[in-house]
Image (cartoon, helix red, strand yellow):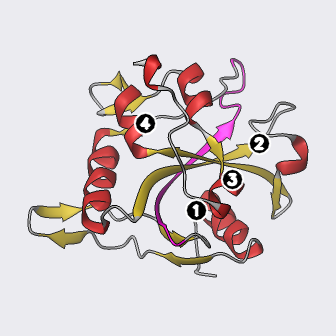
Amino acid sequence: MAKRDNHYEAAFESYLQSRQVAYVAVDEARRSRIAAGSLKNVDFLVSPADGATLLVDVKGRRFPSGVTNPQYWRNWSTWDDLRCLARWQEQFGPQSLALFGFVYHVVGDRSPVPADDLYWFRGERYAFLAVRAADYIRFAKPLSPKWETVSMPAPLFRQAAAPFDELLGRSCESRVSSSEN
């Protein structure tokens, strides 16, 4: 396991190891250079048994976030993250799938997955959900113009999100119907 200061990424890496899935933890210290400029690296290249390469950008969030006013299903990202994921998808081609890996540190009584599906890491509970970058881009709404952040409305996010375990056995298909446009 790579030395990781980010507990969300460390939990995700431990989870992948426990599932005996082939992966590469990408060195985030440097941005990649391609013909059109620099690109933020994905966090993991994951190769499930079906042969597709999952390009995973980990987004760590607490579930719920906030103490006095708990918020569930926080899923914000930046426009740069979306742009870079889309470019990585182009670079790797049709046998790859760019997605956000939402790693929720479950700190309350509710969970985004059934209790039996929570993953214990360093004495804490985590849930792993994936959302295809294409779905996220399609349904993202501006959150903060100043910080160039976006998020998906919670109902659409909940429809689009798949437990990561589901992806490790087969490639991810869009979980949000086109009628939701």
Which mark is first along the chain, 2 or 4? Answer: 2
- Which numbered marker is on residue 6? 1
Total marks shown come to 4
Residue 30 forms part of the magenta stretch: no
Q: What residue type is labelled 1?
A: Asn
Mark 4 vs mark 1, foreground winner is 4
Q: Viewed as shown, does residue 132 lie left or right of 19?
A: left
Q: Nearer the viewer, mark 1 or mark 3?
A: 3
Work out whether 144 lies above or below 53: above
Whether label 1 touches label 3, CB < 8 Å: no
Secondary element at image label 1: loop
Question: Which circle, 4 or 2, is nearer the viewer?
Answer: 4
Q: What element carries label 2?
A: strand
| Residue picked out by circle 3 | 166
Within-10-Å neighbours for mark 4: few <14, some 14–19, many 20+ = many
Q: As displayed, is residue 3 above or below residue 118?
A: below
Whether residues under marks 1 and 2 lie with C-beta atoms below 8 angstroms apart, the answer is: no
Q: Residue 158 carries which label?
A: none
Residue type at numbered disc 3:
Glu
Q: Residue 135 carries which label?
A: 4
Crowd rating for badge 3 (residues with CA inside 10 Å; few <14, some 14–19, many 20+): few
Q: Residue 106 carries which label?
A: 2
Spatial distance from mark 4 to mark 3, Cα to Cα? 17 Å
Near-viewer residue (158 or 149): 158
What residue span does the magenta drawing correspond to?
51-69
- Relative image position of residue 163 (x, y in whole percent): 68, 47
